[in-house]
Amino acid sequence: MAGRREKRESGGFAARLREVIETYGSASALAKAIERSEGAVRKWLRGESEPNVTDLRSVCEETRTSLEWLVTGRGEREALALGVREAATAYENATHKPLDYALLEGVIAAVDEELRRASLALPSTKRSMLIVTLYDLSHERKQVDREAVARLVKLAG
């Protein structure tokens, strides 16, 4: 039964990715923009594989798509306001909100727990990117999204 659930979730992701690619233009254009092979992007579209965390971030940044929406289907699809045509530079885009230490600790604990459960060890750069991504996803809700943690750890592994 777990296999069916994974296939269904994968199909949901693939359908959302297809929607993003149709808006973007084409799978080959997106693949070129994120420096991945067109074959890899087409596998994601068919649900044969899923992008790793780095590729997810690249897709979302390039298409201005909300990471939460692409991964889980929740929230708004657009990462930027509709009137915004160009992404802000890194310094302009920084939010300067105070760090929620309790939430960050919760994200780190959830990632560590999920990595143990999956018997995975990630390089520190990949682990830190995973934590930052999950913190960003969790910050708006002020709570750790365990489903997103499990899914992104699986993708990172």
Image (cartoon, helix red, strand yellow):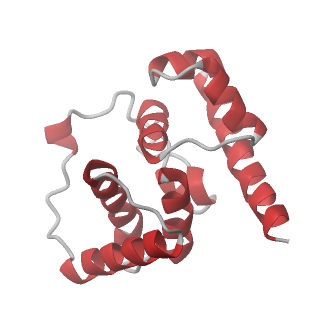
Identity of the residue drawn at 81% across and 63% down: 3
Residue 141 visible in this rendered orientation of the protein: no
Q: Residue at coordinates 41% horizontally, 63% vertically from top-left?
A: 137
Residue 39 image position (x, y, % from top left): 66, 22
Judge whether 54 appears above or below 107 on screen: above
| 99 relative to 85 in the view: left or right | left
* Quadrant (top left, top right, bottom left, bottom right) of the N terminus: bottom right
Q: Nearer the viewer, residue 21 or 113?
A: 113
* Residue in front for this viewpoint, 38 or 136: 38
Residue 78 visible at all: yes
Left or right: residue 127 compared with residue 34? left
Q: Is residue 122 above or below residue 101?
A: above
- Left or right of 97? Residue 36 is right
Q: Residue sitting at 79 percent across and 69 percent down?
A: 2
- Residue 88's quadrant in the figure? top left
- The number of discs equals 0
Horizontal side, residue 126 vs residue 32: left or right: left
Name the residue rendered at 57%, 54% in the picture.
Answer: 71
Which of the 4 image quarters holds residue 112? bottom left
- Up-down: is 86 above or below 104? above
Give residue 34's position: percent from left, percent from top: 45, 25
Name the residue furthest bottom.
102
- On the image, the x and y values in percent for residue 150 come to 54, 68
Whether residue 135 is situated above or below residue 156 in the rendered picture:
below
Residue 14, percent from left and from top: 71, 43
